[in-house]
Amino acid sequence: MPSPRSKLPVTAAPAAGEIARPVYRQDIEQFVQRFDGGLTTDYRFKNRQPLSSEPLLDGVFETLALDGLFLHCVDARDLADRVTESALQPGIKAVLLCAGNTDVVYGQHRYWLGNRADNSGRTINEAALVSYAEPDVFRRYWRHGRTERKISLTITPDWLQEHLHEFANNSAMAEPLRKFQQLHMATTPWQPSAYALNLAQQLLAPPVFCASMQRLYRQARTYDLVLEVLSRFLCTDSAVQSKAMTARLTARELRQVSQLTELLRTEAVNGLSMPEILRMAGIGSSRIHRHFRQVHGCSIFGYMQQRRMNKAYAALQKDGVSVALAAELAGYASAANFSTAFKRMFGITPRQAWTRR
């Protein structure tokens, strides 16, 4: 395990909207060598070794290393049926799927992650949190034609030790995180917030900057994502959660936010103005906008737009709908305006999303 202060190379991030390119065996081998020992070791193909001229992925495949944090971004399509395996080093592993699906094994736990709808029709972006207290296997099952748009975050023990030493002195707050970190192959449910999903989208499709500015942009959002992940463990202690939440919002205010959130997850709000939505939710206070942002990290409108755009993205990739229909699903009367907003959010055009299915 490298020192938390050792500087590891950072891969060059592609500009937002970059055309997908093939990824070959040598690209993956270079990736493994770059992060050997800090993130993964002993990477290998379990079935036939691919030829050097044989493309394996089509899209973006990159990793950002930040002194003990590793952010892996994938927005790609499998071009072959494969099984790959490696040994992941200790750390908390968080994976968040934005679109498509993935089939991976952490230790003895197999995860089929995708986007699904619950009983109310609300889209669920599936995610996983796993603790590696010691090196253990990671396996990925590749499927020809399958698309995957996800981020994977690794928080190493060295990073936690260096950056959270003051937090660790507070035993009441640190105990849930400490228990999870020290229990090998521990898992815990994680339903990412709208804010976490928005961060993931920004990390996958950052604005067009020069290389150094883009790196700073991604670093800032990576740290924001770390806070989102760690807050999951703070919330496992009900007393700490209650104290932290009531310091910001009253029980009534929290109920109002929860009530509004549940309404926004239904089709009943389609076509309604914001005043009409608030009246339907039975909320008259103008403070609801500020309270909603405190809980979700985005505005009410931003939350609605993110859900609609995610629905449109999934419809383009999974169902192969037309761009015009996807625009309608996202609430846009103009396909051109939809395409502009889609590219700003996801970094690719609706047509490119459609062709990657």
Image (cartoon, rainbow, N blue to C red):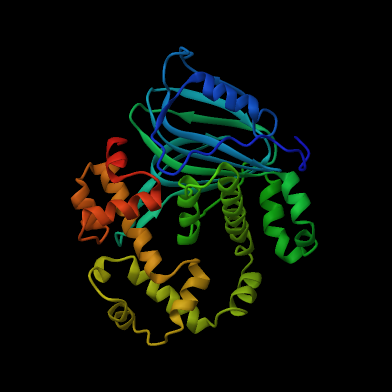
User: In screen coordinates, is 265 left or right of 329?
Assistant: right
The quarter in which the C terminus is drawn is top left
Q: Residue at x 59, y 57 (%)?
A: 224
Residue 151: image location, x then y, percent: 50, 44
Q: In this orientation, which residue lies closer to the viewer: 52 or 261?
A: 52
Question: Can residue 45 be spotted in the picture?
Answer: no
Tell me which residue sits at (26%, 47%) in the image.
315
Q: Report the residue at 24% width, 57% height from top.
A: 329
* Residue 355 sits in quarter: top left
Eyeballing the image, is 275 above or below 227? below
Count of numbered badges drawn on the protein: 0
Please indicate whether residue 170 sits to the left or right of residue 106 in the image.
right
In front: 153, or 325?
325
Q: Quadrant of the N terminus?
A: top right
Q: Which residue reaches farthest bottom? A: 284
The residue located at (35%, 65%) in the rendering is 304
- Hey, which quadrant is residue 137 in on the image? top right
Residue 243, compared with residue 42, is above or below; it is below
Q: Where's residue 3, x and y in %?
A: 78, 39
Query: Considering depth in this image, is 262 or 23 the residue closer to the camera?
Result: 23
Residue 247 percent across, percent down from the top left: 62, 79
> Can residue 126 be seen in the rendering of this structure?
yes
**Residue 255, how many percent across, how many down?**
46, 78
| Between 315 and 343, the one nearer to me in the picture | 343
Q: Tell me: residue 220, above or below residue 66.
A: below
